[in-house]
């Protein structure tokens, strides 16, 4: 127990050196420094490159090649000498797609849908991180409140034990009263050590997400932008939920992939031009050149059924994407409804817990005074002190749940964001939001 107490004291000493911080500051630090979100951001940057890759076939293609060859021919007839030739060739070829049967258009549609899906995935990861930071922030404050409540209980029980011992010495109470006080105090000390261990764990969870240990976390203000009713929440979620946006993007991608697969079996027309030069290093005036210009038409006639098979496969995947969209809509509706009811419950729980604490404090003071006049027993005081502790723990839990429930409601509708700083919401380092 002494080792745990020493470790907890050292941890508190380190975190106490920094000034207090707010939930907004914690969110900003997490978005800027969290490696998981940074990795997702780089995946989004990589996905954005599929659009120029899809547009590339519609642009001119230019290639330049050069070749130098030394040829040494040996004759088997001894009367004939061997022959050696040193030659070079160079060519430049340019091509321009004239007609691709919709290949490029379908490819760019697929690329844009893929980017939209990646943006939705990134936004989902960002909002998930902000919600996780909120939980970690609220957990630290809750565990701090639990530790404070249990420390108060230990002090109260210590005084009760001293009072019971004094009354026992005076012959007013029996040894049982002293033993009851001792047992309750020993239990309270054990639970205090456990609470300190939970606080240390919450510190580590916070540091993993935010990148630094917590320091004097301030009470977070009420969240802004909450929907006025469940119907409004559903409407907002339909427009902003990253889950729905990503599912819609997947449907568009699957639809474009059907056209991409079907276009592979259609005509392809390309304008081609080239210039070639060749000469022998050892023979003057041997240089020749040629210019070419033509139109290449490619029509796949027989591919063993591969193109039709790929097209059927993409159509099946398109149907699956539509079903996934329907499932996502149901999941979002469920999440919004649960978040709405959870927020209402959390709000009511906070109000009830505050009333419970106020009543328990008043009752504890009254029972303590009545004990001093002999109207209450030691057990009654111990029980009332336990009721007060339970009320304080319930309040800490309710306040934590309310803070999380507000942000959970925003995350369910897809509108959870870093609160405004200086009049404007924080943007990601790479300006990825809304692109």
Image (tube, grey):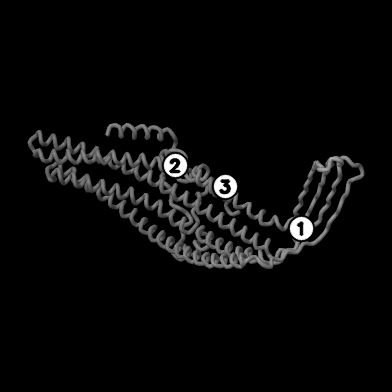
**Mark 2 — residue?**
208
Mark whose residue sits in front, 2 or 1: 1
Judging from the image, what secondary structure is the residue with disc 3 in? helix
Spatial CA distance of label 2 from label 1 is: 53 Å
- The kind of secondary structure element at disc 2 is helix
> Label 2 crowding class (10 Å Cα cut-off): few <14, some 14-19, many 20+?
some
Label 3 belongs to which residue? 42
Badge 1 marks a residue whose secondary structure is: strand
Quarter of the image with the C terminus is bottom right
Asked whether residue 139 appears in the rendered view, the answer is yes
In-image side of 173 versus 197 (left or right): left
Front residue of 22/358: it is 22
State the residue at coordinates (43%, 55%).
Answer: 408
Q: Quadrant of the N terminus?
A: top left
Q: CA distance from mark 2 to mark 3?
A: 20 Å
Which residue is denoted by mark 1 in the rendering?
96
Q: Looking at the image, can residue 423 be seen?
A: no
Residue 149: % across, % down: 29, 42
19 up-or-down from 404: above or below: above
């Amino acid at each position: 127990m002494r080792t745990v107490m020493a470790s907890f004291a050292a941890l508190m000493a380190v975190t106490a050196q920094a000034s207090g911080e707010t939930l907004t500051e914690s969110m900003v630090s997490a978005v800027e420094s969290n490696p998981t979100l940074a990795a997702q951001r780089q995946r989004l940057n990589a996905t954005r490159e599929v659009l120029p890759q899809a547009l590339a076939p519609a642009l001119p293609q230019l290639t330049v090649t050069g070749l130098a060859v030394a040829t040494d021919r040996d004759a088997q007839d001894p009367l004939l000498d061997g022959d050696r030739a040193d030659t070079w060739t160079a060519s430049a070829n340019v091509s321009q797609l004239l007609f691709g049967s919709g290949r490029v258009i379908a490819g760019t549609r697929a690329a844009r849908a893929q980017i939209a899906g990646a943006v939705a995935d990134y936004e989902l990861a960002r909002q998930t991180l902000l919600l996780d930071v909120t939980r970690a922030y609220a957990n630290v404050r809750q565990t701090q409140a639990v530790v404070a409540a249990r420390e108060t209980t230990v002090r109260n029980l210590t005084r009760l034990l001293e009072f019971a011992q004094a009354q026992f010495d005076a012959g007013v109470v029996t040894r049982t009263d002293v033993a009851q006080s001792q047992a309750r105090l020993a239990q309270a000390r054990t639970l205090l050590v456990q609470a300190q261990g939970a606080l240390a764990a919450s510190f580590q969870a916070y540091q993993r997400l935010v990148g630094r240990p917590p320091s004097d976390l301030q009470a977070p203000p009420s969240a802004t932008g909450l929907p006025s009713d469940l119907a409004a929440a559903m409407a907002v979620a339909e427009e902003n939920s990253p889950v729905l946006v990503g599912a819609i993007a997947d449907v568009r991608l699957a639809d474009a992939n059907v056209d991409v697969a079907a276009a592979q079996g259609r005509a392809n027309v390309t304008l081609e031009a080239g210039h070639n030069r060749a000469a022998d290093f050892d023979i003057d005036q041997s240089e020749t050149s040629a210019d070419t210009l033509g139109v290449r038409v490619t029509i796949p006639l027989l591919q063993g059924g591969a193109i039709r098979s790929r097209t059927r496969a993409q159509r099946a995947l398109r149907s699956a994407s539509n079903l996934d969209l329907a499932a996502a809509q149901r999941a979002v509706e469920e999440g919004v409804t649960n978040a709405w009811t959870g927020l209402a419950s959390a709000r009511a729980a906070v109000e009830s817990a505050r009333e419970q604490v106020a009543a328990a404090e008043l009752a504890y003071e009254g029972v303590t005074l009545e004990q001093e006049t002999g109207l209450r027993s030691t057990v009654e005081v111990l029980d009332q002190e336990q009721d007060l502790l339970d009320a304080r723990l319930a309040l800490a839990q309710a306040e934590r749940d309310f803070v999380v429930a507000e942000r959970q409601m925003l995350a369910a509708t897809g509108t959870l964001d870093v609160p405004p700083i200086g009049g404007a919401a924080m943007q990601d380092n790479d300006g990825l939001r809304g692109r």
